[in-house]
Image (cartoon, helix red, strand yellow):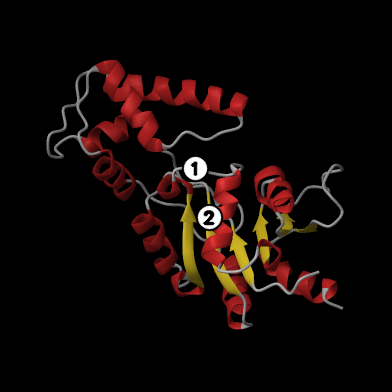
């Protein structure tokens, strides 16, 4: 096994719990009043309908539509005017609380970083980088990360190979020197493994029977250091 130099860490389920998702009413209230924005009656209902429709088609195709895509399509279908999708996205997720970082996971991350591992946050998220950075700073772990690779900023998300390529590029080393850690068997374990990275799955459930043997499993990020010690012997 190549020497591991960089941790690529998922966010939700790895470092934090689940944060709330914006519904149509919150979106309408957050963007109303932005320059040039027109929010007609029925926008909130249309946004919720478009969100449900896209999630169904995304699951069928194994992709993830961005928040901006949902917002743009909702606007087109109900006659709303949203001239600056980036500004609107920022307004929505500034108004919406982010997920809460798990203190045990944060403490484990600080120890791993202090031990010499560089870290990259690699997450599927609609939240813009300034919002996620604010959350990391609040948990006193922002300085642990050399880079943030976020699907909403990148324009593609896990399991697209371009996402893992971006994570490897942000890590600044070959994929085989990156350890991807997350709680989704497909997007955080199997797909990084196929791309050439090492991987560890965080799960409280029994090990998935079809998980490649080279992929480790732990119950919580706080167990990662001991796991790395075991496999390095």
**Mark 1 highlights which residue?**
156
Looking at the image, tell me whether mark 1 or mark 2 is earlier in sequence order: 1
User: In the picture provided, is 27 more to the left or to the right than 39?
Assistant: right
Q: Position of residue 115 (x, y in %)?
A: 64, 82
Viewer can see residue 11: no
Q: Nearer the viewer, residue 203 or 124?
A: 124
Label 2 SS: helix
Q: Which mark is residue 166?
A: 2
Q: Residue at x 56, y 33 (%)?
A: 63
In the image, farthest residue toward the front: 174
* Residues at marks 1 and 2, CA–CA distance in whole angstroms: 10 Å
Q: Position of residue 10 (x, y in %)?
A: 58, 55
Marks 1 and 2 close (CB-CB < 8 Å): yes
Q: Residue at x 70, y 59 (%)?
A: 197
Q: Quadrant of the N terminus?
A: bottom right
In the image, farthest residue toward the bottom: 115
Q: Residue at x 78, y 69 (%)?
A: 227
CA neighbours of label 2 inside 10 A, class few (<14), some (14 to 19), many (20+): some
Q: Quadrant of the C terminus?
A: bottom right
User: In the picture provided, is 125 more to the left or to the right than 7?
Assistant: left
Q: Position of residue 160 (x, y in %)?
A: 59, 42
Label 1 SS: loop
User: In the picture provided, is 228 more to the left or to the right than 6?
Assistant: right
């Amino acid at each position: 096994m190549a020497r591991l130099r960089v941790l690529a860490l998922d966010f939700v389920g790895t470092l934090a719990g689940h944060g709330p998702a914006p519904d149509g009413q919150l979106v309408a209230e957050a963007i109303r009043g932005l320059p040039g924005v027109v929010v007609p009656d029925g926008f909130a209902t249309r946004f919720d309908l478009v969100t449900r429709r896209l999630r169904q088609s995304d699951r069928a195709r194994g992709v993830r539509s961005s928040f901006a895509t949902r917002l743009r399509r909702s606007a087109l279908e109900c006659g709303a005017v949203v001239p600056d999708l980036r500004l609107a996205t920022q307004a929505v997720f500034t108004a919406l609380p982010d997920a809460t970082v798990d203190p045990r996971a944060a403490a484990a991350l600080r120890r791993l970083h202090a031990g010499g591992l560089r870290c990259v946050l690699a997450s599927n998220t609609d939240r813009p980088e300034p919002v996620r950075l604010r959350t990391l700073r609040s948990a006193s772990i922002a300085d642990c990360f050399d880079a943030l690779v976020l699907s909403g900023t990148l324009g593609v998300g896990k399991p697209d190979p371009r996402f893992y390529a971006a994570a490897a590029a942000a890590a600044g080393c070959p994929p085989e020197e990156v350890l991807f850690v997350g709680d989704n068997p497909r997007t955080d374990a199997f797909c990084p493994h196929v791309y050439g990275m090492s991987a560890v799955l965080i799960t409280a459930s029994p090990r998935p029977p079809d998980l490649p043997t080279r992929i480790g499993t732990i119950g919580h990020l706080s167990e990662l250091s001991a796991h790395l010690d075991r496999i390095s012997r």
